[in-house]
């Protein structure tokens, strides 16, 4: 909510939406930059129709209301049912104090563009309750999060101890040096961006052990860092391209897949977020003989199909190429190709046009027909949906989603995908059958 030429109309529309929400708990997105005379009727209406005790999640882009003071007199009028909060920019001190003072053990998730010291200062009560903490600003030095925090997102590695951390995300480019000086016994998932390797790459024989790691996401192009990782329980592995060209990402993936010290062998899902060529896709299938699901992203319709067709619709040739490559590399893989891969999931990053699904149904059936004798029995295909962030009047944004709806909690600028078309090979049949997935992802969001 900001300065708007017709605040009365805006408040009437908000009132109608809040009535429709009934008595359900709400997921709320706030962007408020007004003077007190506009904040007063807005919050008066909110506290009447949707008091803070009904707010389940809260995402704050900006809250600035001048000299306005919140009319809260009782603790049970506060955020007693709030489960998660995200603060992107700035928030009025009155609201900050109320959120922290009235938060209960229901609060589990806290994301903020703050340092650890600032969270300690302004949200001490919340810090003692949450299990998930995300910080957007680097702290002044290394710190130790409280033991109740098991999921942690940081700009860079600034931890004294991480024995109780199960899930770690590092959002800035990292040297891999810290990985060699800490104990990773309990870590279950890791998401990080590799920085410059030239100054930090250890000797080839030096290995970082992740005995409990099940999910690994690596971003950028320097995937060769994984040649120094050991993770015997790894299930899922994602390669996400960085700021360079797709060709750099493909080269980086090819480099690590062909490295003799690369030993990771996930048993679940492999996902590559950039387009692959035939050679690298073949190398990837050969390098991960235990994977059950392969998710591939493609930027162009023609290139995507040509790559899929060249690998999967010429399976005998692909297999011979892989075996030849294996012989030349004298690596230790001996598993027969594609005896574990069950599902192929294609993510197509171009706008859907009429007729595309029919074309891809035919293509998917051809892949299943040409891969008889392998374990592959399902192919999924989805298209990216590009959504715009829809502003309200005067640049205002407030999102109220009753919890009864299983929908997106707040505006999400990331990619969304169409419900997949699914082609499956029936157990007793030689050919695949097309199955339509009718479970769409349309929600009941109310954007005011």
Image (tube, rainbow, N blue to C red):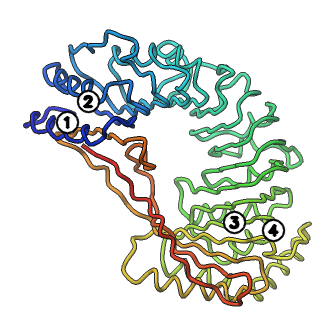
Residue labelled with disc 1? 15
Distance CA(mark 4)–CA(mark 3): 11 Å
Q: Residues within 10 Å of mark 1 (few under 14, many from 20)?
A: some
Residues at marks 4 and 1, CA–CA distance in whole angstroms? 57 Å
Q: Is residue 134 left or right of residue 30?
A: right
The location of residue 148, given as percent across then percent down, is: 66, 23
* Residue 154 lies in quadrant: top right
Q: Which residue is mark 2?
A: 49
Element marked by disc 3: strand
Q: Position of residue 167 (x, y in %)?
A: 67, 37
Circle 4 SS class? loop
User: Where 33 falls versus 317 (above or below)?
Assistant: above
In the rendered structure, find residue 293 and report the number of the disc placed on it: 3
Disc 4: which residue: 289
Q: Nearer the viewer, residue 418 or 47?
A: 47
Secondary structure, mark 1, is: helix
Label 1 with label 2: CB-CB less than 8 Å: yes
**Distance between the alpha carbons at the discs numbered 1 and 3:** 47 Å
| Residue 24 in which image quadrant | top left
């Amino acid at each position: 909510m900001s300065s708007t030429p017709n605040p009365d109309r805006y408040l009437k529309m908000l009132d109608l939406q809040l009535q429709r929400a009934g008595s359900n708990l709400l997921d709320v997105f706030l962007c408020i930059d007004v003077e007190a005379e506009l904040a007063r009727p807005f919050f008066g209406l909110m506290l009447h129709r949707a008091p803070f005790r009904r707010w389940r999640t809260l995402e704050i882009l900006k809250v600035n209301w001048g000299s306005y003071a919140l009319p809260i007199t009782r603790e049970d009028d506060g955020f007693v049912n709030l489960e998660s909060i995200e603060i992107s920019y700035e928030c009025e001190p009155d609201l900050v104090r109320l959120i922290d003072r009235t938060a209960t053990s229901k609060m589990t998730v806290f994301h903020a563009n703050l340092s650890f010291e600032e969270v300690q200062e302004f949200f001490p009560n919340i810090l003692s309750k949450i299990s998930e903490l995300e910080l957007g600003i680097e702290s002044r030095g290394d710190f130790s999060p409280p033991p109740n925090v098991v999921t942690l997102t940081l700009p860079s590695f600034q931890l004294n101890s991480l024995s109780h951390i199960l899930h770690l995300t590092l959002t800035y480019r990292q040297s891999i040096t810290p990985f060699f000086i800490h104990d990773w016994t309990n870590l279950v998932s890791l998401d990080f961006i590799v920085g410059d390797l030239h100054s930090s790459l250890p000797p080839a024989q030096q290995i970082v052990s992740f005995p409990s790691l099940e999910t690994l996401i690596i971003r950028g192009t320097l995937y060769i860092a994984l040649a120094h990782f050991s993770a015997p329980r790894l299930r899922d592995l994602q390669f996400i391209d960085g700021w360079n060209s797709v060709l750099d990402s493909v080269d980086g993936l090819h480099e690590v897949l062909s490295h003799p010290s690369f030993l990771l062998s996930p048993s679940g899902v492999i996902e590559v977020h950039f387009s692959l060529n035939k050679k690298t896709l073949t190398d990837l299938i050969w390098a991960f003989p235990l994977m059950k699901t392969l998710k591939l992203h493609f930027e162009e319709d023609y290139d995507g199909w040509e790559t899929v067709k060249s690998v999967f619709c010429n399976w005998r040739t692909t297999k011979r190429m892989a075996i030849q490559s294996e012989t030349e590399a004298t690596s230790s893989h001996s598993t027969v190709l594609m005896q574990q891969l069950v599902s192929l999931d294609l993510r197509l990053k171009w706008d859907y046009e009429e007729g595309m699904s029919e074309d891809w149904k035919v293509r998917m059936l051809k892949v299943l027909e040409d891969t008889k004798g392998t374990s592959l029995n399902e192919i999924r295909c989805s298209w990216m949906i590009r959504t715009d962030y829809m502003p309200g009047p005067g640049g205002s944004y407030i999102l109220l989603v009753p919890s009864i709806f299983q929908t997106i909690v707040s505006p999400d600028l990331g990619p969304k995908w169409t419900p997949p078309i699914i082609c499956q090979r029936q157990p007793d049949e030689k050919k695949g059958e097309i199955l339509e997935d009718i479970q769409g992802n349309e929600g009941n969001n109310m954007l005011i």
